[in-house]
Structures are given as structure tokens and as C-alpha cells.
Amino acid sequence: MAVPVEQAPAVERARSAAARESWAEAYVLLREADRHPTRALTAEDLDVLSDAAWWSGHVDESVAARLRTHSAYVAAHDRRGAGLAAWWLHYEYAGLGRPAAAAGWLHRARHHLEGLPPGPEHCFLAWTDAEEATARGDHAAALAATGRMTRLALRAESPDLLALAHQATAAALLAQGRRTEATAHLDEAMCAVTAGELSGVFTGFLYCLAITQCMGSADFARAVEWTNAAMEWCAPPWTGRRPDSAEGARDGGVAAPSGENPFRGVCRAHRVEVLDLLGAWALAEAEARQACREVPVDCLESAAAAYYAAGDVQRRQGRLEEAAASYAHAHELGRIPQPGLALLRLAQGRAEAAVAGVDLALACQSDPRHDLLGRARLLAARTEVALAVRDAPGAAGAAAELEVLAGDVPLLRAMADTARGAVALAESRPEPALRLLRRALAGWLELRVPYEAAQVRMLLAAADRAVGDEEAARLELGAARAVFERLGAGPDARRAAAPLTRRRLPGGLTAREAEVLRLVASGGTNRDIARALVISEHTVGRHLNNIFAKLGVGSRAAATAYAYAHNLT
């Protein structure tokens, strides 16, 4: 039967709009056609309506339309269509926090597709198989599933599915610690994304998945690059051109959907974490607020991440009440707000709560390999908290685990060197501390992560003073203070400024040289002084040579007289 004249144009225009990924237009046209039908929408039209509703931010309508899509395919005895619709319902219900419904629809998808010749629809089931196998630690099964994805994608000649297969393979390899192989697959997938070869939904999927993987595996350089690219893709105005258009091929741009983009809030939430590390705190906090307004209801974990990142900025700037509120919002949305909350408690003087919080978070992390950066941050905080409560063994243990975790990953390496340097300094081993901290500083500077670099400079200043290099200590404190002031980290800036404003010691003596002179004046031998200051006798001798030269004296008796004359005893 011919489609009525008054109905055909709207449906045909909607199909054309969907083909251009002009989802807002398709949504309006199909919704109107569905409200005043002269003929029921086909299963394919309902499928388009579901996609258009999702892109337009109407998640509930998307699910409702997808349910009708599934029913229509079942009524038409189209098992492939019904299986794919069931899988998408599984995916959407999982995003909405309804695991029982998601599991039911996944079972139904398998039932529909069981026994059919392998097709593109089976690729989605293989993706689910890979993720489930990775979650339970069955690496062989995970890679077998991603291998099926790749074969199905190649057979279907689908750039979307092939890129997804590369991403899934990268995830499975990362779970085994095979970083080099994983990175190759991830780069292959992202090459297709940035070349504009994929549809809008797969472009968004892969940006989100890749950035999450890069941050979890502490691949900071790639996280920065792809976060910037993702935000460019999300930014209006969109052209609405197809990915394979001649125009898109000429300018190298990534095809992006017209209208609203539900990936924008998620990508912005990822960007907040990158901006935080780069020290763009004002922008990070503003972007966090915007992300929380934009994140769709089926991606609330991204809003939680944005609230958490905002809390970290507020905490380091001394805005402790605001930080507490941000961490509470993150917790309400399902994120454990650690280690930020533990460090907040430490800043509030609640050391026991800080220890308990970070220890519980470490215990609750079922498989640290799924989030290396998260584990590393917890261990770094555990080291800091333990040192604050004078738990030297606890700090050393956390730093040692962090060292094992770090390997040759630059971001983790800098974190591990910082933690081990802080432990060595607390154990009165300034020379090893200096070596570790100088390496840590070089790492943070190369990564362009200013706050952590400034924190290391504070530790370096203490180590410099411990070996008697007062000038180097003052240089490190001055550099740290400048960074803290630029970032708005008021408490840290004041901490860095305090030693710089203390009165200068007479004779150009350093603080450590003054300590040695006081002990000399009290009758201490070199061995006594070494034992008291936990340094070697050789170091004591070097300090004495410096003291004699600065004061113009040639004996311990003359140095003692100088100490009494200048109130240094």
C-alpha cells in the first residue's frame, strides 16, 4: 500500500536527516509522525526514532522507542533486527543503573541471534563477552572474543565495528599489562576516529573509551591529545556532514552530528581531569560545573568524576568546605571520593579519618590493573598520610608498592620517585632523597604538571637544608612559592614563603651549619654530632670546614666563642 501523501514527506525527511546525522531534525519529524499516524512507523523508523531521541537528550523516550523497535522486529520474524535491538536495550539499561533489566535483555539478544550465521550483530555480543571475560580475569577468553569482533568487522566491511574491535583488543591487552601492544591497537582505533571515518555514535564511544583507558593506564600524553580532539568534535556549530563526504575528506575534519551532542558532557568531564593535572584550575572548575549540567542521565559516573576533580581543586586552594561539598556530590553519584577526601581530612587535622579513608579505598579496589592511575594516587596519598602521622613503615610500604606499579610509565614513575624521596627524607637519608626527588622533579616538569612539581620542590628544599645547601633550598622554595601563588594554592604558598621570611643567620651560616655549631659549642665530638643529626661523620667534617671558612676561625674553641657571642647556643 502506498504511503499517504501527508505522511510520506515527514518520514522520508526524517530518514534523510538521520542519514546526515541531523538527529534533532529527525527526532522532531518522527515524533510528530508517531503522534499523528496514518500508518504505523516501521521497525527501521522506530530504530531511527530511538537513536534520534538519545542524541537529542531524551533517554527515556529512546528506551521506549527501542522497546517498540524490538517488538516490531519480533513481529516481522527478523531475528537479527530483534537481536541488535535487544543488545542496545541491554546497553541502555546498564547505563541507567538497572543491571537486572540489562542482564535480561542481553540474554534475549543472545537468544535471538543464536544459531544464525555470524553477522555484524554478533560483533556486539563478542564485545560484551570480551568485557565480561576481562572483568573476571580470563584474559585468553577476552582476546578470543576481540578476535571474533575483528573477523566479524572485516567480513562486514564496517569501519565502525573494526575500530571498536581495536579498542576492545587494547582493553584486553592492557588488563594483562601488555602496554605496547595495547597502545598500537588503541592508536589504530583513534586513527579512524580522528580521520573522520566513523559514524557519530562510534566516534563518541571511542573518544570516551580511549580517554578513560589512557587516564586509567596513566598515558597522560595521549589523554591530553585525545581530550582536546574530543572537545573540538563536540563543540558547536556542527556541520552535519557525513563522515565519508568529500568535504570532510578534504579538510581532514571529524564528522560530527548536528544538534545536541550527548557525548559533550562526558568528554568535558574527562577534560576536567586533564586540566587539573596541567594546572589550569580555574578553567577545570568551570568546566566541571558545565559538565555536570551537560552529562546525560545514563552517564552519571562522568558527573561524579567532574565533582571529584572540582573538589581536588578546591581542597588545594584551601576552600575546604567547598571541597567537602564537591566530594559529597561525587559520593552521591556513586564515586568513592578518595584519595581526595582523605587528604581533605588531613588538612582539617583529622589524621585518623584520613588513614581510615585511604586504607578502606585501597582495600575496596578489587583489581588495581583496571585503574593503574587510581591505584597509584591512592598509594601516593597513603604515603603522605602515613608520614604525617609518623608511620614510617606504613609510608615505606605504600611507596614500595607504588614503585613496583610504576614501571617505566612517566606519570607513575614521577609519583613513585616523589613518594620514595619523601620517605627517604623522613628517614633522615637526605642524599638518597635528593637523587629521587631531583628525578621526580624532572619527570613532573617534562609532563608539564606544575602542582606536583612544586610539591617536590618543597621536599627538595628540606633535603637541601639537611645537607647544608641553604642557597639551593631557598631557590627551590622561591620556585615552589611562585607556582603555588599562580595556581591559587594559598596554604601551600604560605608554607613555601615561611622559611624565606625567617631571619638570616650570622656569618652566612645555613640552618644545618648552625645546628652543627650549637652541638660543637656544647662539647660534642664529630661522632656525637653525627649520631644526633643522623648523618655521617664525613658530613659533619664537611660542615665544620664550611663553618670555619665562613666565620674566619681555625679551631673548635674559636667557633664556640663565636657561637656564644652571636647567641647561637
Image (cartoon, helix red, strand yellow):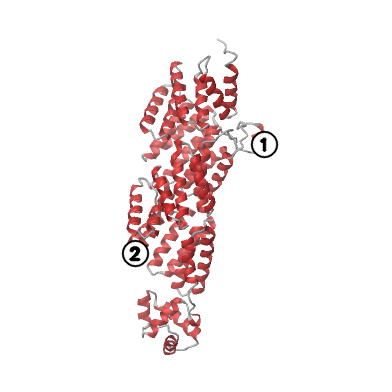
Q: Which mark is residue 144?
A: none
Q: Residue at x 65, y 35 (%)?
A: 249
Secondary structure of the residue carrying numbered label 2: loop
Residue nearest the viewer, comparing 276 with 76: 276
Asked whether, in this view, residue 462 is left or right of residue 8, the answer is left
Q: Residue at x 52, y 48 (%)?
A: 286
The residue under label 1 is 250
* Identity, as a three-letter code, of the amino acid under mark 1: Arg
Task: Using the rendered view, name the quadrant where residue 297 is placed.
Answer: top left
Q: How many marks can you see?
A: 2
* Identity, as a three-letter code, of the amino acid under mark 2: Arg
In percent of width and height, residue 356 lies at: 32, 54
Task: Using the rendered view, name the quadrant where residue 389 is placed.
Answer: bottom left
The residue under label 2 is 390
Residue nearest the viewer, comparing 246 with 287: 287
In percent of width and height, residue 195 lies at: 60, 38
- Separation of residues labelled 1 and 2 (CA atoms): 62 Å
Q: Residue at x 53, y 61 (%)?
A: 485
Residue nearest the viewer, comparing 361 with 126: 361
Residue nearest the viewer, comparing 330 with 247: 330
Dividing the image into 4 quarters, which one contains the C terminus? bottom left
Tell me if label 1 and label 2 are in contact, CB under 8 Å: no
**From where the camera sits, is residue 392 visible?**
yes
Q: Residue at x 45, y 28 (%)?
A: 63
Relative height, residue 48 to residue 131 (above, below):
above
Dividing the image into 4 quarters, which one contains the N terminus? top right
